[in-house]
DNA sequence: TGCTAAATTTGATAATTGTCAAATAATATG
DNA sequence: CATATTATTTGACAATTATCAAATTTAGCA
């Protein structure tokens, strides 16, 4: 919980009561490796935060599983479209390692946002961060080739390469497993 | 101004005083075709809304100009990273047609967000919309081929194809002008 | 209207990445 | 520790898209 509150404070420093209020709507569960937090077709009611551990967001695309996002160690993640638009999620979420996962229900969050301008502001900043990350990822996919994208990941999150199977990383980068294998072995 | 306020109301219905307050920080200017709203290297202080008209966000990438975004008729646009992070913009913005452009200064917006929870909430919803659009675009670029991306644009914004030069559309779709030309002429 | 410049298309070829199959390496389990 | 299973790599080939050059079409303007 300390890590969660530290990450929150980093985005926007809430007053003490607001922080207490906000933390109060987060529940934590420890999931075994491979456990599903969300299955495709369900409306996703939660925004998540992973403690020490690893989580994968993915979906089915014509026989294949595509990794949409990887969250390791103390990061937020959620099924953006389902959470905001309250529609069934194409995305599924499972753990790649045994992980402590914190989750906050959509309705609880919305209720707090109504009550507290501070929390509304924090939430706005969280979304802004997501938006910027989304933009950076989009440009990477649009304008970098397989090798450059691999290098970007290697620089930014070397941990991922050690802890996540190659096949998941490949589709996260938007390339095939074979191409990734070639790219990282110097070609 | 009516169109701007209509689009705002669509995102989140502000109370009358809040709407008046919010509209008061927007200034409007009519720009000739080809005028620059933002040059690369400047910190972008504004969020924009284009009335009847067309605007292009682009940047320089190794000798070439890449179109990052196209905004036609009654849509919002801005240099996301520069606006939020207050860093110099890689992106430049110019008009493709004579256009009435509304703009809102970052600091004015932030000040209103401090004062008014309602406006903070509206702003949060605006960013959420951007985030969802960004996600959709990312997936389109990652998983659709040139032909599918062209079709998506043709369905979603047929106007763009009539009013924007092919070379701009091509880089917006992440393909070359030649490939776009082939794709749209049945191949 | 005719001419010039810009935009678009077409052709030939190269580069990148994907696909499918098989081989090899790594890991887990009895 | 041996074996079964899974993950990764390698090879051959195909598909898609990029690149460069040239031809053609379109649009702007005198």
Image: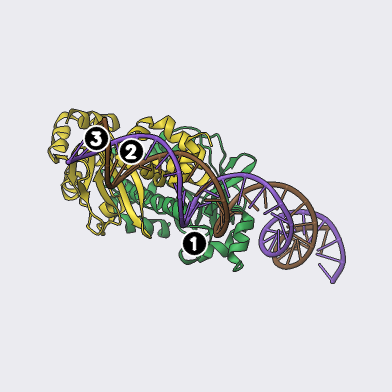
Chain colours: A green, B yellow, C brown, D purple
How crowded pointer 2 is (Cα within 10 Å; few <14, some 14-19, many 20+) is rated as some
Q: Earlier in the sequence, mark 3 or mark 2?
A: 3
The answer to which quarter of the image holds residue A1 is: bottom left
Tell me residue D28's x, y (percent): 24, 38
Given this view, does label 3 or label 2 mark the residue nearer the observer? 2
Q: Which mark is residue A74?
A: none
Tell me if residue A116 can be seen. Answer: no
How crowded pointer 3 is (Cα within 10 Å; few <14, some 14-19, many 20+) is rated as many
Check the residue under mark 1 and report the chain it is in: A
Q: How far, Cα to Cα, is label 3 from label 1?
A: 37 Å
Q: Which residue is mark 2?
A: B164
Q: Are marks 3 and 2 on the same chain?
A: yes
Q: Which residue is mark 1?
A: A148
Seen at 52% across and 34% down, the residue is B186
Give the structural element (helix, strand or loop) at label 1. helix
Seen at 26% across and 48% down, the residue is B93
How crowded pointer 1 is (Cα within 10 Å; few <14, some 14-19, many 20+) is rated as some
Q: Which residue is mark 3?
A: B53
Give the structural element (helix, strand or loop) at label 2. loop
Is residue B73 toward the left or the right of residue A48 in the image? left
Given this view, does label 3 or label 1 mark the residue nearer the observer? 3
């Amino acid at each position: 919980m300390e890590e969660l509150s530290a990450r929150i404070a980093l985005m926007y420093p809430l007053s003490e009561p607001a922080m207490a209020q906000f933390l109060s709507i987060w529940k934590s569960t420890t999931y075994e490796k491979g456990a599903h937090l969300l299955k495709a077709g369900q409306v996703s009611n939660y925004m998540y935060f992973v403690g020490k551990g690893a989580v994968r967001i993915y979906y089915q695309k014509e026989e294949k599983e595509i990794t949409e996002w990887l969250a390791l160690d103390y990061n937020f993640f959620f099924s953006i479209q389902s959470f905001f638009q309250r529609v069934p999620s194409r995305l599924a979420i499972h753990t790649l390692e045994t992980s402590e996962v914190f989750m906050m229900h959509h309705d609880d969050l919305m209720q707090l946002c109504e009550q507290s301008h501070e929390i509304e502001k924090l939430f706005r900043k969280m979304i802004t961060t997501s938006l910027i990350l989304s933009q950076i990822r989009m440009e990477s996919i649009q304008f970098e080739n397989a090798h450059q994208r691999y290098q970007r990941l290697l620089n930014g999150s070397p941990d991922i390469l050690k802890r996540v199977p190659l096949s998941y990383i490949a589709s996260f980068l938007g390339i095939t497993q074979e191409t990734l294998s070639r790219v990282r072995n110097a070609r």
